[in-house]
Amino acid sequence: MAKSRARKRLIEAELTNADWGQIHKKAWLDDDFKKLLEADPTKAIKNYGRTVGKIFKKVVTVRPKPEGIADEFLHDVNPFPPSCC
């Protein structure tokens, strides 16, 4: 009798802050995953998605350019608030 494998249903989703937290946790605890994340982040994140039942259409989303800042000063802009402290 052949074993039947239940296929995990994958849902299309966007990466959330909770996903990023889990990705970092996995990288800290799993050296192979950390190496893959550093070498091929898209592949690593897609692999993570399959383990949690998600398909990510985008791995990186670039936010709109901030208004009122000259192009030569854009390198000083951090589109994200501080993540600690």
Image (tube, rainbow, N blue to C red):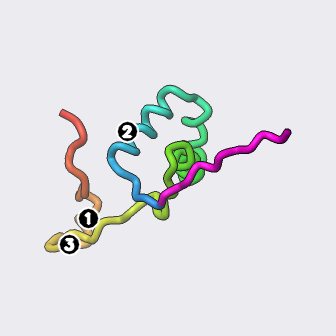
Alpha carbon separation for disc pair 3 and 2: 33 Å
Q: Which residues are magenta?
A: 1-11
SS of the residue at dot 3?
Answer: loop
Residue at 53 percent of width and 55 percent of height: 10
Tell me the number on the disc at residue 21. 2
Pick the front one: 2 or 72? 2
Q: Position of residue 37 (x, y in %)?
A: 54, 43
Residue at 56 percent of width and 48 percent of height: 50
Q: Image check: 20 left or right of 52?
A: left
Q: Position of residue 81 (x, y in %)?
A: 20, 49
Q: What main secondary structure does the magenta stretch of the protein show? A: loop
Q: Position of residue 45 (x, y in %)?
A: 52, 49
Q: Nearest to the eye among marks 1 and 2: give it.
A: 2
Q: Residues within 10 Å of mark 2 (few under 14, many from 20)?
A: few
Reply above or below: 53 against 69: above
SS of the residue at dot 2?
Answer: helix
Task: Give the residue type at disc 1.
Answer: Leu
Q: Nearest to the eye among marks 3 and 2: give it.
A: 2
Residue under label 3, please give it. 70
Task: Give the residue type at disc 2.
Answer: Gly
Q: How many marks?
A: 3
Residue 64 quadrant: bottom left
Alpha carbon separation for disc pair 1 and 2: 27 Å
Pick the front one: 28 or 4? 4
Pick the front one: 46 or 77? 46
Kindly give the residue lying farthest to the top in the view shown.
29
Q: Which comes sooner in the sequence, label 1 or label 2?
A: 2
